[in-house]
Image: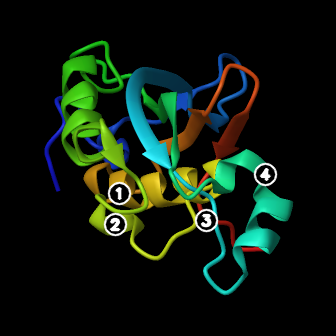
Amino acid sequence: MQQLCAPPLARHPVSLRPHQGVPVKRYVYITRRGHFSAAHRLENPAWSIEKNMEVFGKCASPNYHGHNFYIEVTLRGEVDPDTGMVVDFSDLKRIVDRHLIDQVDHKNLNLDVPFLRGVNPTAENLVVKFWEQLAPHFPSGMLYKITLYETAKNVVEYYGPSED
């Protein structure tokens, strides 16, 4: 796991709510925005071309199509009293670029990205796979949300695996 400038959550002191003596954690959410361009094709390989076109429309074109994707990676943590930060933004940028953006930018998501092999690259599937790529590089519980903008009007959010 790559080290971040701010210490992990477990090392942050618990604050007390004034006049109540009740321990409370004060979480701050920080977000890094990124951008990548990529091509993809939506398809279920078990279906005929006709069925894929019926379900996915022009997104099932055998010649692929592209998007200028925007992504937001949000972390949650307490502010380190020594640095005044949850995480140094330059560390967050480096992790997102190295473990995600560099892997998908100007690529065919169906053919060129090993962690997407065999995945129908819908926005919903992409955001889940992106979480899997990034989560190991942050302390447990720090990765809060990933938002993926496939277009200005088509946006998906993922908050990580759920226990229900």
The label nearer to you, 1 versus 3, is 1
Q: CA distance from mark 1 to mark 2?
A: 8 Å
Secondary-structure class at tag 2: helix
Q: Are marks 1 and 2 in contact (CB under 8 Å)?
A: yes
Q: Which residue is mark 4?
A: 57
The answer to which of 133 and 35 lies nearer the viewer is 35
In the displayed structure, does residue 84 sit left or right of residue 78?
left
Q: Which residue is mark 2?
A: 115
Which numbered disc covers residue 133? Answer: 1
| Residue type for callout 4 | Gly
Q: Quadrant of residue 20?
A: top right
| Tag count | 4
Q: Quadrant of residue 11?
A: top left
Q: Are marks 2 and 3 in contact (CB under 8 Å)?
A: no
Q: Quadrant of residue 81?
A: top left
Tell which residue pokes out farthest to the top in this image.
Answer: 84
Q: CA distance from mark 3 to mark 4?
A: 30 Å
Asked if residue 79 is positioned above or below residue 111 in the image, the reply reads above
Tell which residue pokes out farthest to the right in this image.
Answer: 54
Q: Are marks 1 and 4 in contact (CB under 8 Å)?
A: no
| Residue type for callout 1 | Gln
